[in-house]
Amino acid sequence: MSTEAGIRPPGTTPPEERGTGRTLAAADARAGLALISPTVVIVLAMVVVPIVWTVLLAFQRLRLLNLRSSGLFGEFTLSNFDNVFTAPTFWSALATTLTYSVLGTAGAIGLGLVAALALRRPFRGRGLVRAVMLLPYVAPIVAATFSWSTMLNPQFGVVNHWGTRLLGWDEPIAFLSQRSSDISLFGLTIGVPTALLTVIAFEAWRSFPFAFLFLTARLQAVPATLEEAATVDGATLTQRFRYVVLPQLLPTIAVLAVLRFIWTFNSFDDIYLLTGGGAGTEVVAVSVFSALTARGDIGGAAAQALVLAAILAALIGLYLWRLAPREERS
Amino acid sequence: MATMTRDTVETRVFGVLRIVTIVLLLIITIFPFYYMGLLSLRPLDRVLQDPGALWLPPSEVNLDSYGSVVAPPSAGGQGFLIFLANSAVVAFGTVALTLLIALPGAYAVSRLQFFGRRQVGVLFLAVYLFPPILLAVPLFVFFTRIGLRGTLVGLLIVYVSQVVAVSIYMLRNYFDTVPVSLEEAAAIDGCSRLGVMWRISLPLAMPAIIANALFIFMIAWNEFLFALLFLIEERDRWTVSLGLSQLAGSIEIPTTVLMAGSVIVTLPIIVVFFASEKLLTEGLTAGAEKG
């Protein structure tokens, strides 16, 4: 597409055509391409080419040690994928990633919806409260994870301190380093994946402001007359929410679900910083990172990243195919 | 009459629930940051003796943790000033470079008909949603080969490529709201295309540009994965986020010092955010009604 500018260099238009709509359009087309080309170049060079390269790397036995000596196109092999698919750790990482993404997304949207509804009616200081609620989302991830891991620390964390004193916990809970803990409920003892649930709670806490922001914007666009009419017809508060407000919010919720799912599925920082991928929280992104840096296995890391992207693409495709047409009808 | 009472009951119940919810939400959003500030100001031995304290008596306020974080390594500190400078260079550089590239692009996408306009939009959306970890592998290899790994310039280029698409999207929405008639009037008065852009469209879009700049600044300041991948071996070039995460790995550094570091990383963001909250949220949710 960027060759278009080269085919028709500036100034080649015959002079008699100047001033007509046609030339203006041609000038616009040239200017448009010229203005957009720096962006296209950097995106192609730093995003598209690397993605293509990942595909190539995934089919090579490339290690960090022989990186400088090896050529761009080495011997192609399927062994990286073979390793990925036969390793039990990959499947467990994938299951963890899915659990983390689904529950994290649901938690974030649920909390965001509750917040948006609670702050819907104006009150004094609402602007400030709204701004404060966006803090978890804008704060640096490293600081947020540190604060959480200190709060949850079994030795001197504030949560365990008050938990053991006020909530009657038998002993401090190692929220971030304990794979599972038994909880007695009605005489039944259930094993709960402690660390995984903690990182999911963190994810919901960190990204609920995003859902809150978009749902608030959408709520403001709900026409007041609809609800007034429903009130006149005798609909109660919950009925008005169920039959008037919620249907209006559903398209936004659907978009949020897709976006948050994609980002959570790909996310690396939160889990790497909270648990380092330990105690049953290793998601695929963290395992790609450790393949790359700890083991120096470039081919293996690329293959895992590629499988991750392929699964994500398949899930999005499935969503678009199954669900998107239904929304358009409503 | 029955429905009337049900409605009254519901209105009362949810009226109370609403206040409870708001208070709870405020506690969960603020507390981690409050706790961070609290620990950063308490002496370590006091924290270990009384970990449950939720209030800091003024007599206990202690700034040693901050001193230890900021002091250069030669004086036994963690050298956070260097990290702060690195982060500032990368964040401001990313903002300047991204705006320089994205402003003309956004203007073109909003105003000019050109071949491939739609495809460019799809490409940018794909970039926005792509897993960064997938880019990590090839960029790591590429930068190692050309010797840019371990430099701030390499990091800056990656950041620009990551945010430029979002930037164009945000700015385009704003350019769309600037009336074309204003530009046409200027064109009739003899302004060139660039002149129109410079004199009419840019000044009118200034709020959006500032919002976008702040948004980019926050992303670049907060970024962690690529900083970790590219800069880990070069202590002098660590950004604050990376520096902080590396401090956590060593056992000798007390939690109070880590919390002081966390406050230092977070403060610029909080200042930027509260100074521009309205601009930012409007910029972020522009077009949300459509979606």
Image (cartoon, coloured by chain):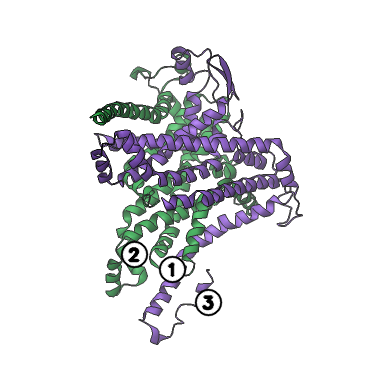
- Label 1: which residue? A32
**Residue A130 in sight:** no
Of the chain colours in the picture, the one used for chain A is: purple
- Left of A69 or right of it: where is A177? left
Foreground label between 2 and 1 = 1
- Label 2: which residue? B198
2 and 1 marks in contact (CB < 8 Å): no
Dot 2 falls on a residue whose secondary structure is helix
Residues at marks 2 and 3, CA–CA distance in whole angstroms: 28 Å
Seen from the viewer's position, the closer of residues B3 and B127 is: B3
Residue B190 location, x and y as percent? 29, 75
How busy is the neighbourhood of tag 1: few (under 14 within 10 Å), some, or many (20 plus)?
A: many
Q: Please determine if labels 3 and 1 lie on a single subunit.
A: yes
Residue lying at 47% horizontally and 55% vertically, measured from the top left: B165
Residues at marks 2 and 1, CA–CA distance in whole angstroms: 15 Å
Of the chain colours in the picture, the one used for chain B is: green
**Residue farthest front in this picture:** B1
How busy is the neighbourhood of tag 2: few (under 14 within 10 Å), some, or many (20 plus)?
A: few
Q: Which mark is residue A7?
A: 3
Seen from the viewer's position, the closer of residues A328 and B151 is: A328
Dot 1 falls on a residue whose secondary structure is helix
Compared with residue A264, is residue B211 higher up or lower down, i.e. above or below?
below
Give the residue type at disc 2: Trp
Residue lying at 42% horizontally and 69% vertically, measured from the top left: B113
Give the residue type at disc 1: Gly
Foreground label between 2 and 3 = 3
Residue lying at 52% horizontally and 69% vertically, measured from the top left: A2
Dot 3 falls on a residue whose secondary structure is helix
Chain ID, mark 3: A
